[in-house]
Amino acid sequence: MVKDLGLIRYAQAYEFQKKCVQDLLQGGPQVLILCEHPPVLTLGRMAKRSNILVSHEELAKYSVGIHAIDRGGDITLHAPGQAVMYPIFNLSHMGKDLRRYLRHLEQVAIDLLKGFGIVANRIPGYTGVWIEKKKIASVGIGVRRWVSFHGLSINVNTDLELFSMIRPCGLNVQMTSIQEIKGRRIDMAEVKQKIIRCFKENFLLDLLSGE
Amino acid sequence: MHKVIFPELGEGIEKAKIACWHIAVGDRVAKDDDLVELVTDKATFNVPAEVPGIVQEICAHEGQEVGLGQVLAVLKPSIG
């Protein structure tokens, strides 16, 4: 099922992910969680604090929280206007292959962008989804008993200035968004509908709309 | 004794780092309890206990790189 949590604090969404993982392990449904977060930095297990480029005072001034979390990858930023997807899926049914799953998540972003007339790609040796040399989508996952959590984020209308606070994923890259490329603000409801369709196609899932 | 082995995580994944241990020597664990979190470049993976038992030995430290098939810990299986 799909659970759209809207704009929700990171910690609250994280607790909800954990609950969904537990539910799935006990026979519950696979869930695709969709949400946006108020500005927050998350540090994956490979994160280096040196990839935060501003002081803690400055982060506090803009009410940007920091969470060290149990996903792979380095640092990333979430903020309103970024579509965040946390698929709580049973990877036992998908070949028990972490890389394959990550490639599927990237394909969701590539297909979504195609729906907006944008050609996006992978870059060999890097994860995520790119438009030429700018990054638009990031992936990072956690897996417990072959149930996935964390997932994929894609910049839709994100304030890209916020990324100047970090070295995203530990890389010296520029981020972009659908808004920047299309030159107009994008309707997030339309994005979410397209995301659900892309997940259905890539994972052959029957994702029924949840409450 | 039951050896906890670095599992197959998918094509091309032959190494990972120990992110953290959820257990210590002497702990009693149930089947499916998370024992250790491995981390690759973009994923964490919790290795579960395949049998209930008592942790006899932990064979790799946090931050250590480990490889496919490597023994990560040893459990003394409990009966019943």
Image (tube, rainbow, N blue to C red):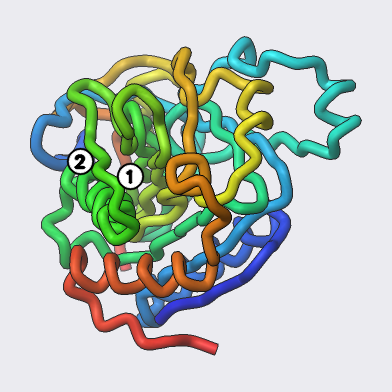
Tell me which chain the residue with mark 1 is part of: B
Amino acid found under the numbered disc labelled 1: Val
Outermost residue toward the front?
A: A183
Circle 1 Cα neighbour tier, 10 Å, few/some/many (<14 / 14–19 / ≥20): many
- Name the residue carrying label 2: A99
Say which amino acid is labelled 2: Arg
Q: Chain of mark 2?
A: A
Is the Cβ of the residue at disc 1 closer than 8 Å to that at disc 2? no
- The quadrant in which residue B1 appears is top left
Q: Position of residue A78 (x, y in %)?
A: 61, 43
Is B6 left, or right, of B47 in this rendering?
left
Which residue is drawn at the image coordinates 37% and 66% (left, top)?
A195
Q: Can see residue B26? A: no
- Could you tell whether A33 is left or right of B2 in the image? right
- Point out residue A201 in the picture as x, y percentages from the top left corner: 19, 70
Answer yes or no: are tags 1 and 2 on the same subunit.
no
Q: Secondary structure at mark 2?
A: helix
- In x, y percent, where is residue B21? 47, 33
Along the viewing direction, whichever of B18 and A16 lies nearer the viewer: A16
* Residue pictured at 75% horizontal, 16% vertical: A54
Q: Where's the C terminus of chain A, which quadrant?
A: bottom right
At numbered mark 1, what does the secondary structure look like: helix, strand or loop? strand
Going by the image, does A169 lie left or right of B3?
right
Q: Nearer the viewer, mark 1 or mark 2?
A: 2
Image quarter where the N terminus of chain A lies is: bottom left
Q: CA distance from mark 1 to mark 2?
A: 17 Å
Name the foreground residue: A33 vs A38.
Answer: A38
Note whether A147 is above or below A207 in the view shown. above
Point out which mark residue B47 bears.
1
Which residue sits at x=71%, y=34%? A66
